[in-house]
Amino acid sequence: MGRAVITLVTTKDIYVGMAIALARSFLYWNRDQEIDFHLVTDLDVDLPRDLKSIRVVRVPRGELGIGFSPKLHLDKLAPAEQTLFIDADCLCLGPLSDVFDRFAGHAVSVFGSELSTGHWFGDIEPLCARFAVPALPSFNGGVYYVEPGEKASAIYARARALEPDYDAIGLVRLRGRPNDEILVSIAMAEFGAHSIPDDGTIFACLEHFPLIHQLSVLDGICRMSNPPEPHRLHDPKRPAGHAAPRRIAHFLNSYTEHWRYRAEVLKLRLILESGMPGLLARPLAETSVAFPGWSVEVAKNILRPAYRKLFGVRPIAPSKRI
């Protein structure tokens, strides 16, 4: 096989529905692109009838580890000469052939930048000195690219070898677990592998741009931003700005519960599983999911100041993903 997309569904059943939505968005845009889709899982996954072309790869429960550890095994899971890993909580917004083209020739790569100072799951400058590298690739692990071979195997073997020393190295955990991104980053840097720069037009995630302005998988449209202060969703760790990914959007953390995401997932199900025309699926999803969700969001924004004066700030609910 020449090209394949893989996603992981391990440990928790909550990821099954996300992976099904990802697969549908992939098929909607890439059915004729000669790209296979593989779902790797250690759970009992029963795919709906519209996804029978998807290849399910079953592994023994817990074999790949838990938390973020399964993503440290992509070199062994990659089924094609060019393999693109996409997190289950992403949606495809267009054909992916040009994404493979951009990564071609890289043993392991990501969309990101290079850091030599600052903080990213640890203090970058001491880390660079410790591992004798000039900089570390900084990225969101929602997308990885792998060309199986000696170099890719060496990079991932090194990342796996670093994991037991995660705390001793001084790396910061994510949700209480070792994070795949910083481990792969160190290994990439040691073997001279680099990230592919992207300005948010190919891949972007809600971690960096937490405000969704517009989302339509059927039209390949996604607009998101990190709004300026004093907007309540402003992320002070990042500059204000916009992104408009045309290929992959990453709905990490609780954003898969957002009404915009849920409306798109319903449209895809109605069209691909039920065979409903888009002219019917769109208004049905808008009236049953989008409008109620938008109404609740507006009401909360209006009432939030009064609620906080009366009752204070509510504690953050624990993540369903942990």
Image: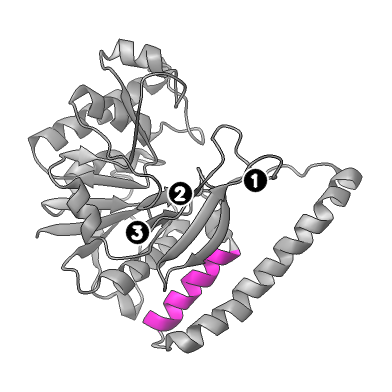
In which quadrant of the rendered view does residue 140 lie? top left
- The image shows residue 218 at horizontal and vertical percentages of 41, 73
Q: Amino acid at mark 1?
A: Leu
Q: Secondary structure at mark 1?
A: loop
User: Is 37 in the magenta?
Assistant: no
Of callouts 3 and 1, which one flags the residue occurring earlier in the amino acid sequence?
A: 1
Answer above or below: position of 196 versus 259. above
**Which element is circle 2 on?**
strand
Element under disc 3: loop
Check disc 3 and report the residue beneath it: 247
Query: Residue shown at 33%/24% (left/top)?
Result: 164
| In the rendered image, the vertical position of residue 96 relative to residue 277, given as above or below | above
**Residue at point 33%, 45% (across, down):** 62
Q: CA distance from mark 3 to mark 1?
A: 24 Å
Which residues are the magenta region? 259-273
* Res 64 visible: yes
Residue identifier under label 2: 205
Q: Position of residue 38 (x, y in %)?
A: 24, 61
The mark nearer the N terminus, 3 or 2, is 2
Position of residue 68 measured from the top left corner of the image (x, y, whole percent): 38, 40
User: Of label 1 and label 2, which has the lower sequence position?
Assistant: 2
Q: Provide the residue designation for mark 1.
A: 233
Residue at image position (78%, 63%) is: 299
Asked if the residue at tag 1 contacts the one at tag 3, i.e. Cβ–Cβ closer than 8 Å, the answer is no
